[in-house]
Amino acid sequence: MTTAVKVDEDAKSRLEELQAEIRLETGTRVTQQELLSRIIDDAYTSREAVIDSFRDTTVPLSAEEKEAMAEGRFSSGVETDEDDIDGILYG
């Protein structure tokens, strides 16, 4: 059973590019249906990564986010150890 799925022109173009690259690299012709099935199978086995890709925020931070955090840091000149942190967090 086949079902039509609508994709935008950019996605269609990238699918065709992948299809052509597979043929060039392996010498094997694959249909777009075969390629999409393989992509779906791979995504299914790593579903957490796919689900996470739809979240508003991602972890780990991007390079820009890391840089922004580093810019906000300063040294107070006071050394802090685990007991200090526990005291602050847990009272």
Image (spheres, rainbow, N blue to C red):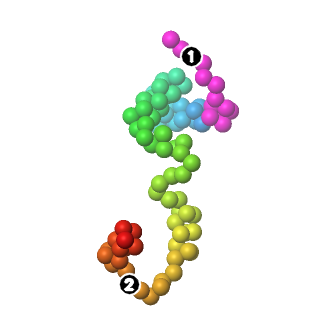
Quarter of the image where the C terminus is located = bottom left
Instruction: Of the two numbered discs 2 and 1 on the same chain, state the one appearing first in sequence.
Output: 1
Residue at the disc numbered 1 = 3
Q: Residues within 10 Å of mark 1 (few under 14, many from 20)?
A: few
- Residue at (53% x, 69% y) in the render: 69
Apparent side of residue 88 relative to residue 74 in the rendered image (left or right): left
The residue most toward the left is: 83
Q: Look at label 1 and name its amino acid.
A: Thr
Asked if marks 2 and 1 touch (Cβ < 8 Å), the reply is: no
Q: Look at label 2 and name its amino acid.
A: Glu
Picture layout, residue 27 above or below residue 49: above
Picture layout, residue 27 above or below residue 62: above
User: Which mark is drawn over residue 74?
Assistant: none
**Magenta segment main secondary structure:** loop
Q: What is the x, y in percent for residue 80?
A: 37, 80
Element at label 1? loop
